[in-house]
Image (cartoon, grey):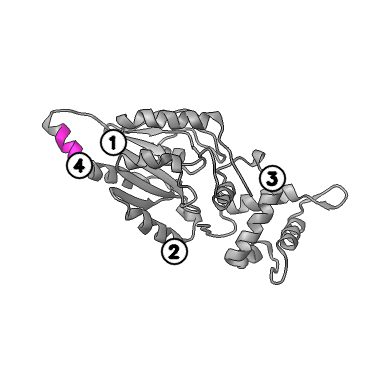
């Protein structure tokens, strides 16, 4: 499925990030651990290459542990970078980021100390929509200073957030790129909720998702919906799930759209199991 979604505020966000880069010491790059490679935004390449980077594999409670460990090692090998896995919904879990920042910026801290300066570290938080940036910032700040939501496009403008006396974070809008030419990447971003359902052919997306999960591990569908998948087409499986869940419209017709929304919601909330798509 060919998917592109690049509203005006995303272009403005990229412009703001470029201008603010000179004011930050470090980048915190948030990647949804269920599709970390797909979450890499080519428009961020220049930004992330100019400063030390902490890659955060967010929502690790929802992803496959072995695959998450693989991606953690992969991103840790990048120059001037570290990578951690994190469930930001657990109170205090993000404190490790403060420690990492202070370690990675120790030379600057020493320089400031010698000059008698008391300047807080400043980090820019970047990522695709719905990757968990604002939840991470709220975790670090120990209170709800950044707006959060379970759909893309909640944060629209830049927000500076003081998480303590020594660290300020710039929360930026979730941003995609103008042309997602890789259909697999676009589809996986849609699966994890980085692209609004409202602009998608949601029924087709649901059918594709069923096919992809069947290929990945059919037992995930079988255990969740109490069905058998062996020898059945993706459409037959999709229709059986819809019937099991009661997604039937007037006239006893299958409501494919409601079915797709329900199946994708099960995935996004971890009800299908711990899944990594990349």
Q: Which residue is mark 3?
A: 201
> Mark 1 touching mark 4, by CB under 8 A?
no
| Closer mark to the observer between disc 1 and disc 2 | 1
Gap in Å between the C-alphas at discs 1 and 4?
11 Å
Q: Is residue 51 above or below residue 276?
A: above
Q: CA distance from mark 1 to mark 3?
A: 41 Å
Q: On the image, numbered disc 1 is attached to which residue?
A: 25
Could you say which is closer to the camera, residue 179 or residue 37? 179
> In the image, residue 27 lies at what x, y percent?
34, 40
Cα distance in 3D space between marks 4 and 3? 49 Å
Sequence order check: which comes first, mark 1 or mark 4? Answer: 1
Question: Which residue corresponds to the image point at 31% horizontal and 50% vertical from the top-left?
Answer: 82
Residue 126 is a magenta residue: no
Expressed as whole percent of the image width and height from the top left, the position of residue 68 reads 43, 58
Which element carries disc 1, helix, strand or loop? Answer: loop
Residue drawn 72% across and 51% down? 259
Q: Which residue is mark 2?
A: 66
Specify the segment rendered in magenta: 106-112
Q: Which label lies toward us, 2 or 3?
A: 3
Q: Earlier in the sequence, mark 2 or mark 3?
A: 2
Residue that badge 4 annotates: 106
């Amino acid at each position: 499925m060919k998917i592109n979604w690049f509203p005006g505020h995303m272009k403005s966000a990229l412009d703001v990030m470029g201008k603010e880069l000179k004011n930050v010491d470090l980048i915190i790059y948030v990647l949804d651990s269920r599709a970390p490679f797909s979450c890499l935004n080519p428009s961020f390449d220049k930004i992330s290459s100019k400063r030390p980077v902490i890659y955060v594999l967010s929502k690790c409670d929802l992803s496959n542990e072995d695959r998450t460990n693989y991606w953690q090692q992969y991103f840790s090998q990048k120059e001037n970078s570290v990578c951690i896995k994190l469930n930001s919904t657990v109170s205090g879990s993000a404190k490790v980021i403060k420690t990492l920042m202070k370690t990675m910026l120790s030379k600057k801290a020493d320089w400031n100390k010698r000059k008698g300066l008391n300047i807080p570290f400043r980090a820019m938080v970047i990522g695709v929509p719905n990757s968990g940036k604002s939840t991470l910032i709220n975790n670090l700040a120990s209170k709800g200073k950044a707006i959060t939501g379970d759909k893309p496009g909640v944060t629209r403008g830049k927000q500076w957030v003081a998480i303590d006396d020594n660290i300020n974070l710039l929360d930026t809008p979730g941003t995609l790129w103008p042309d997602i030419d890789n259909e697999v990447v676009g589809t996986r971003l849609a699966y994890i909720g980085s692209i609004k359902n409202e602009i998608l052919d949601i029924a087709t997306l649901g059918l594709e998702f069923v096919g992809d999960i069947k290929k990945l591990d059919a037992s995930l569908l079988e255990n969740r919906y109490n069905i058998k998948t062996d020898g059945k087409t993706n459409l037959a499986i999709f229709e059986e799930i819809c019937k099991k869940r009661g997604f039937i419209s007037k006239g006893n017709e299958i409501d494919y759209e409601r079915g797709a929304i329900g199946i994708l919601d099960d995935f996004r909330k971890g009800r299908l199991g711990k899944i990594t798509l990349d």
